[in-house]
Amino acid sequence: QVQLVESGGGLVQAGGSLRLSCAASGRTFSSYAMGWFRQAPGKEREFVAATRSGVTYAADSVKGRFTISRDNAKNTVYLQMNSLKPEDTAVYYCAADVPPKGSPYYLAPTYDYWGQGTQVTVSS
């Protein structure tokens, strides 16, 4: 079992920044493929960003604004969000693919473990 705990959400004005953190349990974190997803009210959960095998990926809607990174010494993955827009408002979830299966990184079913989510609200 892998436990994931997100933090860093909150209320921010459009154009502002937030950094989300996701702390993971386990002794082999460096091997985990990690992803961030989000879900807005009335919408399906959507891919935001992922990192695996040293490569990072981002959805077109956040490319150039959001950056995923990880600190394996701290068992933590981050999502730096800049130039936030009202349409970024959602609950953000951290997810882990353990062990990495090579399935599409942008699909939610690829991931085995999920955090509880953290709310991000961007006001206009």
Image (cartoon, rainbow, N blue to C red):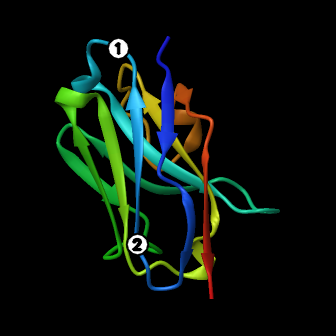
Q: Nearer the viewer, residue 26 or 59?
A: 26
Label placed on residue 75: none
Residue at the farthest right position: 42
Q: Which residue is mark 2?
A: 17
Q: What secondary structure is found at the residue carrying circle 2? A: loop
Instruction: Give residue 94's position: percent from left, percent from top.
Output: 49, 41
Q: CA distance from mark 2 to mark 1?
A: 29 Å
Using the image, determine if residue 17 lies above or below residue 109. Answer: below
In this picture, residue 117 sits left or right of residue 31: right
Local crowd size for mark 1, using a 10 Å CA cut-off: few (<14), some (14–19), many (≥20): few
Local crowd size for mark 2, using a 10 Å CA cut-off: few (<14), some (14–19), many (≥20): some
Q: What secondary structure is found at the residue carrying circle 1? A: loop
Amino acid on which the number 1 mark rests in the picture: Gly
Using the image, determine if residue 41 lies above or below residue 117. Answer: below
Instruction: Give residue 38's position: percent from left, percent from top.
Output: 59, 55
> Looking at the rendering, which quadrant does residue 101 occupy?
top left
What residue is at 35 percent from the left and 75 percent from the top?
A: 65
What residue is at 31 percent from the left and 35 percent from the top?
A: 76
Label placed on residue 26: 1
Amino acid on which the number 2 mark rests in the picture: Ser
Instruction: Give residue 115's position: percent from left, percent from top.
Output: 56, 34
> Looking at the rendering, which quadrant does residue 91 occupy?
bottom right
Q: Nearer the viewer, mark 2 or mark 1?
A: 2
Quadrant location of the C terminus?
bottom right
What residue is at 45 percent from the left and 85 percent from the top?
A: 15
